[in-house]
Image (spheres, rainbow, N blue to C red):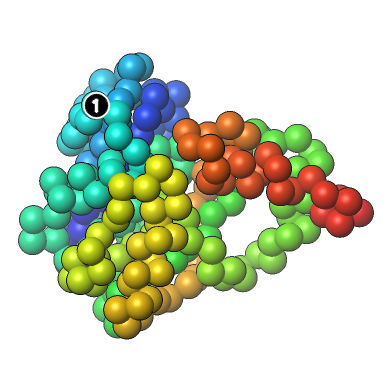
Amino acid sequence: MDVIVVIPARDEEALIGPCLDSVIAAATPTTRILVVADGCVDRTAEVARGRGVEVLELTGRSVGAARRAGVAHALGNAEWIANTDADSVVPTDWISRQLEYAEEGADVVIGTVRPNFADLDDRRVRAWLARHIPGHANGHVHGANLGIRASAYLRAGGFGAEPEHEDVDLVARLTATGARIVATADIDVQTSGRLVGRTPGGYARHLRDDLITPEAIA
């Protein structure tokens, strides 16, 4: 099955290298990798090209628009779209496991994410561990770990141009079209534990504002 991996990035020169190394290690022979450098003023595009992957440079839109443009640019005849983020590291079986679910009939594969604990203080690590059961698929949608059948993606209208939560919006529309959704903890992606992200909300805001509560650290 032909696969495209679309990775939006804005000023991620420090993290895009490890991300791409992991995606390249997970790639199948028919995988095409595209980094969408969206309004970058650093060396993100240069680092990506140095890894031998394709780069699409935009003038600064939004993460939703970047994902949408990336899919439109790379899709061609590909049958599967694997999505991750430039601050994330995927496991070596990331693509192959998504394709196994696709072969079993899944149109959408929602994987779990975990923060890089080295980026968090001890309180946040304890709070995160208290809220997450290892091996449990919580069904939370993350653009850092999302696979979609191309035909289902097109039927649902693709990513919107939202500045954040474009992944959640798309999965809601996919669900409305009757797409078969599979949530799994088998494919776990590590993402940055930074507390200030590239959007006002998103995972960084969750780590910063939601974890440290009396209940979470009791």
Quadrant of the drawing holding the N terminus = bottom left
Location of residue 42 in the rendering, given as x and y in whole percent from the top left corner: 35, 17
- Residue 113 located left or right of residue 122: left
Instruction: Identify the element where label 1 is drawn.
Output: loop
Q: Residue at x 41, y 27 (%)?
A: 12
Q: Residue at x 39, y 24 (%)?
A: 11
Q: Residue at x 46, y 42 (%)?
A: 88
* Residue 8 can be seen in this image: yes
- Front residue of this view, candidates 138 and 27: 138
Whether 81 is drawn above or below 136: the answer is above
- Residue 49 located left or right of residue 192: left
Whether 112 is drawn above or below 182: the answer is above
Whether 145 is drawn above or below 43: the answer is below
- Front residue of this view, candidates 13 and 67: 67
Q: Residue at x 30, y 34 (%)?
A: 61
Q: Quadrant of residue 96?
A: bottom left
- For badge 1, the amino acid type reads Thr
- Residue 102 located left or right of residue 124: left
Residue, disc 1: 59
- Residue 90 located left or right of residue 202: left
Seen as rendered, the residue at the extreme top is 42
- Front residue of this view, candidates 170 and 22: 170
- Front residue of this view, candidates 131 and 48: 131
Location of residue 201 in the rendering, given as x and y in whole percent from the top left corner: 55, 43
